[in-house]
Amino acid sequence: MLRDETLIWEGHPTWRASLSFHAKGFLLSVAPLLLVLLLRWAGVDLPVTWGVLILVAGVALTIAASWVMRYFTQYTITTKRLQIRRGILSKTETSANVDRIQNITVFQSPLDRILKVGAIDFDTASDDPSDRFGFAGVNEPQALRERIVRARDEDRRTSPGNGQGGLG
């Protein structure tokens, strides 16, 4: 962290946000088993073991891919900046100054609302699409948005016009 910077929030995407990814992976993994069973019903002599092996491998691969995507994505919000770190061997780090945030939008599907997860989109003071920030799959996104807004408003109230940017 930078000098005079305080951590507001740090986290990874939650496992609950990965449930739709898991469901899709499971359905794709079940398809070969169903195909083998259908062909056996039609009279083709295929071992069911092939379908079961593909099912087990598909489910394991889905779980592993989800874990890697979650574990190696880190979100950080400090009083000065937003930061996203991704990667295993090579890291990609993207950050933006908090004082450039113009809008904070929370996105939640009906399933996301039930699971209390969602995505947060931060619009910065830039026309460049690459400057858009988003935290996908965070727990209780409304509460996180309120923490950011409260900290930003507190900083503006206690130090108006300090010209240094950020929240602190």
Image: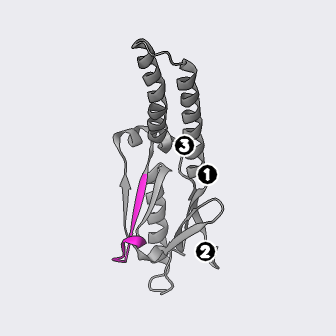
Query: Label 1 neighbourhood size at 10 Å, few (<14), some (14-19), many (20+)?
Result: some
Q: Is residue 12 visible?
A: yes
Dot 3: element: helix
The residue nearer to you, when weighing 157 against 88, is 88
| Mark 1 residue type | Tyr
Considering the numbered disc 2 on the image, is that residue within a helix, a strand or a loop? loop
Q: Residue at x 36, y 76 (%)?
A: 128
What residue type is disc 3 on? Trp
Residue 10 position, x and y percent, is 58, 59
Q: In the rendered image, which residue does mark 1 sit on?
A: 71
Asked if residue 117 lies left or right of residue 63, the reply is: left
Colour scheme employed for the rendering of this structure: one colour
- The residue wearing badge 3 is 15
Q: Which residues are magenta?
A: 119-131
The label shown at residue 5 is 2
In this figure, what is the number of numbered marks? 3
* 105 to 33, vertically: above or below: below
Which callout, 3 or 2, points at the residue further toward the start of the chain? 2
Please give the label number shown on residue 40: none
Q: Quadrant of residue 99?
A: bottom left
Rendering coords of residue 95 (x, y %): 52, 72
Q: CA distance from mark 3 to mark 1?
A: 10 Å
Whichever of labels 2 and 1 marks the residue nearer the N terminus, that label is: 2
> Residue 159 at x, y = what percent?
49, 81
Label 2 Cα neighbours within 10 Å, binned few <14 / some 14-19 / many ≥20: some
**Magenta segment includes 77:** no
Asked if the magenta segment contains residue 129, the reply would be: yes
Number of the front mark, 3 or 2? 3
Disc nearer the start of the sequence (3/1): 3
